[in-house]
Structure formats: structure tokens, C-alpha cells
């Protein structure tokens, strides 16, 4: 089977990844159902690391369930919850069970000091740590008994100012990042500058898109996403309908059309699908996407 790494490096087709959160407890039934819904329809699945400070199964174990269910994982790991010793141990364990892709992230900031954030390293330092394991070295520079040659990814914000975007990307690439996933967008026109930057620098980027099945979901996004442009058309279409099913259909169809537009500009290596409000909608979106 061709790996996610091989696909994105070859660059001869449009890729799709999506995000699925590990279960909130030891019962994995619904989590595994979501994995099966996307199996064979996406190129890899991100397993999140306690997103929005919610208690979840460790992404290391969640990645094992993904592999068991025939889905290639991209294991997310944040700077927030572990010191460098804990991070290193988790990464070695992840490699041993078959994880080959890692996305290095800062992590959602704790509120009111609970839980306490660790942040012993920043994202660039985390990428360097992961890259070091690929050379068979731990964070002290000591040899370990093998190499953990992860395909390392990082995040980019398509709404950053040009100077900040360039600095952020260059730092992460120098540290060892080989691909990027972005925050979600709603409108291609709002990221013209970002698209130019990606094209000029030949960066491997999966552009984020998000399924928003309600006005409440859109309002929450507006609170946390600086610079994001949400088309009036989407807001108005969601308001037209009262039933949950109709609103979900509007959101899924909007995403499908947006993905086609992204595909047509031939700048990005693919898309990364978010659906935090209802992950089962990812499967519905994948069903209607043109092959």
C-alpha cells in the first residue's frame, strides 16, 4: 500500500485527510465506526491530542486502533501536556506500533490554570526533537537503539501577515517539517496571498476546510478565528432551514463545492477536513465528493 508520505511527496494527485478525536473513555466502538466510515476514502486520518482540553484516549493508542482498522494515522502531539521525556517516550512507542506520521502542535491553551500546561518546548523545538529521533538520537543527543524516522508535519495559519507567515514556515521547515495542514478556510479569495506563498515556495500544504452544520458552530468559529472570512451565503442558507438534517446538508454541500474550487487552483496538495460539531458528517461529505 502506498503511504501518505509517498503520496504527498510524489504530488501527482489531490489528497484528503480528516480529523477524528480519540474516544472520551475506554469504549472504542463509536470511534472505530468513524474510522471505518472514512477507510479507503481518505489518505490519512489525524488523531487529536486532547483537543480543546477535553479528556481523551492518548493519540498513541488511538493510532493503534486506526492501524488495526486499516486507516493510516497522522498522530498529533502537542507541547502542552508532556515534558520532553514524556514526549520522547510516546514517540518511541508510537513508532514501535507502526505510526509513521506525526503533526507537531502547540496545543490549546489551558484556562484558569487547569489543567496546568507544560510547554517545556515550543513547536519548532518539538519538531527538532522528532527529527532527532529520526537520526536515532534522543533530546540529549544520546543514541537510542533504532531510528524513528517520522514524516513530520506542522500547522500554518493562512490568515497570518506575510512576514509572520514566512518566518513561521521557514523556522518549521528548517527544524524538519515536511508538510503542513492549515486552519480551516471558507473562501478561496480570502487566502490569495497565502496561495501565492505556497506556490512560490513549493510547500506541501493540505488546506483546511470545516463542516459547520449550524449557526452556533459558525458563531464559535468567529470567536476564535482571526481574519477568517465566512461567506454570507453560507450563513443565510443555514438560517433558511429549521431541521438539523437540512442544515447538515447545506454545510456538507458547501464544503464539497469549496473542495472542488481548491482542487481547481492546483496549488495545494489536498485538503484537511474538520468536523468538530459532528464527525459523522465527514463520511457524508466524502460520499458526495467527485472521484
Image (cartoon, grey):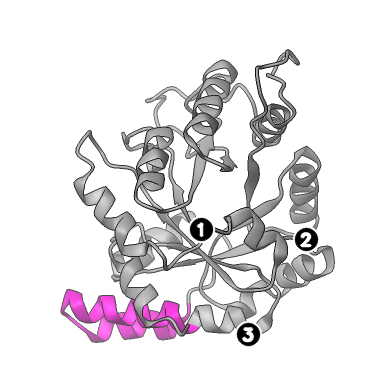
Left of 214 or right of it: where is 12? right
* CA distance for labels 1 and 3: 25 Å
Res 40 quadrant in image:
bottom left
Left of 259 or right of it: where is 21? left
Residue 170: percent from the left, percent from the top?
80, 48
Label ID, residue 264: 3
Give the class, few, some or many, for how many residues have Cα within 10 Å of label 2's Cα (few <14, many ≥20).
few
Name the residue rendered at 51%, 78% in the picture.
259
Q: From the viewer's side, name the closer residue of 275 and 149.
A: 149
Left of 222 or right of it: where is 136? right
In the image, is residue 81 above or below residue 273? above
Give the class, few, some or many, for how many residues have Cα within 10 Å of label 3's Cα (few <14, many ≥20).
few
Name the residue rendered at 55%, 77% in the picture.
187
Res 15 quadrant in image:
bottom right
N-term-proximal mark, 2 vs 3: 2
The segment highlighted magenta reads: 231-257
- Helix, strand or loop at label 2? It is helix
- Helix, strand or loop at label 1? It is loop
Q: Are marks 1 and 3 in contact (CB under 8 Å)?
A: no
* CA distance for labels 1 and 2: 17 Å
Residue placed under numbered mark 2 in the picture: 162
* CA distance for labels 2 and 3: 24 Å
- Label 1 or label 3, whichever lies nearer to me, is 3
| Residue 279 appears in the picture as rendered | no
- Helix, strand or loop at label 3? It is helix
Residue placed under numbered mark 1 in the picture: 225
- Residue 92 part of the magenta segment: no
Q: From the viewer's side, name the closer residue of 169 and 264.
A: 264
Name the residue rendered at 50%, 80% in the picture.
258
Amino acid at each position: 500500500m502506498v503511504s501518505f508520505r509517498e503520496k504527498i511527496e510524489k504530488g501527482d494527485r489531490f489528497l484528503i485527510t480528516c480529523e477524528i478525536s480519540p474516544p472520551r473513555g475506554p469504549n472504542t466502538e463509536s470511534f472505530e465506526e468513524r474510522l471505518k466510515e472514512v477507510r479507503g476514502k481518505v489518505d490519512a486520518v489525524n488523531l487529536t491530542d486532547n483537543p480543546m482540553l477535553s479528556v481523551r484516549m492518548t493519540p498513541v493508542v488511538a493510532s493503534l486502533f486506526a492501524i488495526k482498522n486499516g486507516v493510516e494515522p497522522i498522530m498529533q502531539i502537542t507541547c502542552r501536556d508532556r515534558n520532553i521525556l514524556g514526549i520522547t517516550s510516546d514517540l518511541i512507542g508510537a513508532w514501535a506500533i507502526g505510526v509513521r506520521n506525526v503533526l507537531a502542535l502547540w496545543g490549546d491553551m489551558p484556562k484558569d490554570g487547569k489543567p496546568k500546561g507544560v510547554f517545556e518546548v515550543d513547536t519548532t523545538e518539538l519538531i527538532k526533537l522528532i527529527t532527532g529521533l529520526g537520526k536515532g538520537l534522543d533530546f540529549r543527543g544520546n543514541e537510542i537503539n533504532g531510528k524513528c524516522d517520522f514524516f513530520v508535519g506542522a500547522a500554518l495559519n493562512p490568515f497570518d501577515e506575510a512576514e509572520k507567515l514566512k518566518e513561521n514556515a521557514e523556522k518549521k521547515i528548517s527544524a524538519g517539517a515536511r508538510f503542513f495542514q492549515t486552519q480551516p478556510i471558507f473562501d478561496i479569495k480570502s487566502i490569495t496571498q497565502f496561495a501565492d506563498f505556497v506556490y512560490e515556495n513549493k510547500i506541501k500544504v493540505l488546506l483546511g476546510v470545516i463542516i459547520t452544520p449550524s449557526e452556533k458552530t459558525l458563531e464559535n468559529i468567529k470567536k476564535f478565528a482571526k481574519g477568517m472570512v465566512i461567506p454570507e451565503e453560507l450563513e443565510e442558507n443555514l438560517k433558511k432551514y429549521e431541521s438539523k438534517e437540512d442544515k447538515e446538508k447545506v454545510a456538507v454541500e458547501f464544503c464539497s463545492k469549496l473542495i472542488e474550487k481548491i482542487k481547481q487552483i492546483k496549488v495545494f496538495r489536498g485538503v484537511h477536513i474538520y468536523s468538530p460539531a459532528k464527525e459523522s458528517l465527514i463520511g457524508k461529505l466524502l460520499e458526495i465528493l467527485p472521484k
